[in-house]
Amino acid sequence: MGESTDPPFEITYKNLLNNMPNTNQKNFPELPVVEESELPLIDLNHLYLGDTERQACKKLIAQASREWGFFQVINHGIPRDILEIMRAEQVKLFKKPFEEKKSYKDLNFSAGSYRWGTPTATNLQQLSCTTMEQFATTVSQLAQTLADILGEEMGHKTEFFKETCLPSSCYLRLNRYPPCPVHPQMLGIMPHTDSSFLTVLHQDNIGGLQLVKDGKWIAVKPNPAALIINIGDLFQAWSNDLYKSVEHRVMANPLNERFSTAYFFCPSYDTVIQSGVYRSFSFGEFKKQVRKDVELFGSKIGLARFLVPSSISRTHGGSDGGSSGVSTDYSTNGFRDAAYLISVL
Ligand SMILES: O=C(O)CCC(=O)C(=O)O
Ligand SMILES: [Fe+2]
C-alpha cells in the first residue's frame, strides 16, 4: 500500500475477486457482445442561428430525450480551457496517496467528500476551488438551457427550473476508474439511473460508458468535442414518462484509467414534482426513499416506488423505464477509485 493512490480494492473485494470465474475456463459464459454506437449528436450552435434552425435543434433535443434518454452536444458553450483545467485538477487530486485522500489532508474538501467503492456518505456542503466553480457555473447554464427547451417542447414555457435548480442543489462528481486487469466484466459503476432532472457528463477518450437502448446494452463511443447529456428520474416523472431516464453503467478498462466528471442538475429538496404517472413527491422524499431502498435491498428502486396505482399495469419494470438499478448517490459498488461529491457554492 504505502503511497498507493488506489483504495485497497484487493483487500475489500478479496472474496469477490477470488470467487470470480476464471476467464480461461471453458465453461465461462461468453461476454455478451455490446455494440458500439454514437449517441445522437446535436450542434447547439443551431440554437443561435435563424428561427428555423433553432426550432429544428429543439426538436432534436426532445426527440433524443424521448428515444434514447441520452445525447451528446457540441458547441455547448463550455470553453475548452475550462474543461482541460478542470480535468488536470481532477487528475492531480486523484494522484494523491490514498491515505492522504482518505484523511483529506491538504484537500480543500470537507469530511466525507472522498468516497470509493460502496459509499455510505450523504450529501455534503462544500465550497470548492475556482476551477470547479467556473466549470459548475458554465455547465449549469447549459443544463438550464436544455431543461427549458425540454419543458418548451412539452408545451410548458416555464420558470420552474430557474426557480428550483439552484447552485446549492446541484452536484458535481469527479470519477476516476482505475485500470482493472483482474476481470473483463468488472464494473466501474453498477447499472443505475440518475436521480437528477438531467446530468451533464464530461468523459475522456477511454470509453466504458454503456446504456440500455431497445433492451440491449450499447457502448458509447467517446467524442472529445462533445459533452454527454442524460435525462434523470425527475425529468422522466415531470414529463409523464415522455423523456426517459435510462439505465447506464461503466465497464472498467483492463489497462487504462479513466476519468469522468458528472454535473447533476437537481432541484432543492423541498421541490415537489407533479406528475400524472407518479404521485406527487418532493425531491427530498425521493432521495430518502432511494437511501432506504439501498439499505434494505442493496439497490435503488427509484420511480417505480411512486407510480400511481392506475399506471402500474402499464409497461413499467422494463430496463428502459428507469425503474431499476442502483442509486448513483448511495450504492455504486464497482471498481471505481473515488468520487468527490460536491455541492457547488
Ligand atoms: O463515468 C461515467 O461515464 C458515468 C458516470 C455516472 O453514470 C454517474 O456518475 O452517475
Ligand atoms: Fe449516472
Image (cartoon, helix red, strand yellow):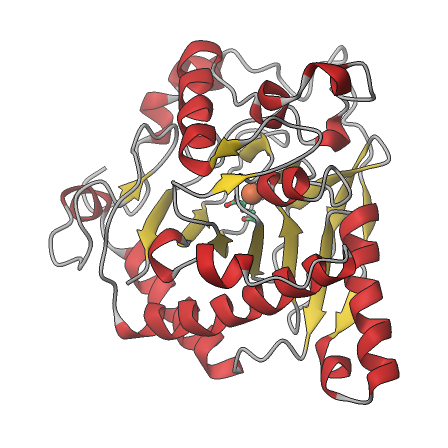
Q: Position of residue 338 (x, y in %)?
A: 36, 43
Side (left or right) of 173 relative to 121: right
Which residue occupies 65% across, 51% down?
230
Q: Nearer the viewer, residue 342 or 284?
A: 284
Which residue occupies 35% across, 68% down?
132
Q: Is any part of residue 141 visible from this angle?
A: yes
- Give the quarter of the image for residue 133: bottom left
Q: Is any part of residue 39 visible from this angle?
A: no
Q: Nearer the viewer, residue 155 or 68?
A: 155
Which residue occupies 76% across, 54% down?
154
Q: Nearer the viewer, residue 235 or 264?
A: 235
318 to 67, vertically: above or below: above
Give the mark count.
0
Q: Nearer the viewer, residue 285 or 205?
A: 285
Side (left or right) of 338 relative to 313: left
Side (left or right) of 190 relative to 239: left
Q: Quadrant of the C terminus?
A: bottom left
Q: Position of residue 128 (x, y in %)?
A: 25, 63
**In the image, farthest residue toward the bottom:** 50
- Give the quarter of the image for residue 247: top right
Q: Position of residue 211 (x, y in %)?
A: 71, 41
287 to 75, vertically: above or below: above
Q: Position of residue 130 (x, y in %)?
A: 28, 74
Which residue occupies 41% across, 67% down?
136
Q: Quadrant of the N terminus?
A: top left
Side (left or right) of 185 relative to 92: right
